Image (cartoon, rainbow, N blue to C red):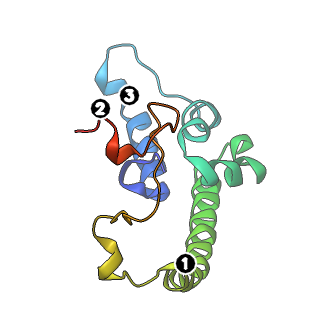
Amino acid sequence: SSLPGNDPNEYVERIFTINERLTYFERGATEFSTKQLNRKVIAKNIGGTFKSKYLLQGGDDLDDEDNILDLINKISKCVAAQKEEEEPDRKQNSKRDSKPIDESTASTKKVNPNIQQPCRKHDGRHDWRNCPDNP
């Protein structure tokens, strides 16, 4: 996620706080309305899956700070629950897919001297072990 600290709730609260204090940064500066702040900053900067859920649930049309925070909180809980459900599946898959390493074959591959290995440089005209260009 592209959110600072990876917590959407903290991110949105931080954005509202910054907006409230904009007038202190520069003379003549004004705050964004909640709807403008939501559309121009919040909806455009929340990341990935979270953003799609926010937009699908009409988050970019909200114009009340409490409603925005409630929706962000609801989506956060939903995403966290999905991650918890997926976690056991990932652990099972990684255990199933991992194979023990056979130490005898894990080191360098040994070439069987009885098997012909054609020289790729000279179109297989001789064994690569007998190639004059082989160091």
Is label 2 or label 1 in front? Answer: 2
- The picture quadrant where one finds residue 66 is bottom right
Which percent across, then down, holds residue 88? Answer: 55, 85
Q: Residue at x 41, y 18 (%)?
A: 29
Please, what is the three-letter code of the amino acid marked with disc 2? Asp
Residue indicated by mark 3: 22
Please, what is the three-letter code of the amino acid marked with disc 1? Arg
Is label 3 or label 2 in front? Answer: 2
Residue indicated by mark 2: 133
Disc number for residue 90 = 1
Q: Residue at x 74, y 41 (%)?
A: 61
The secondary structure type at the circle numbered 3 is: helix
Which percent across, then down, holds residue 38? Answer: 60, 38
| In-front residue for pair 85/109 | 109
Q: CA distance from mark 2 to mark 1?
A: 49 Å
- The picture quadrant where one finds residue 86 is bottom right
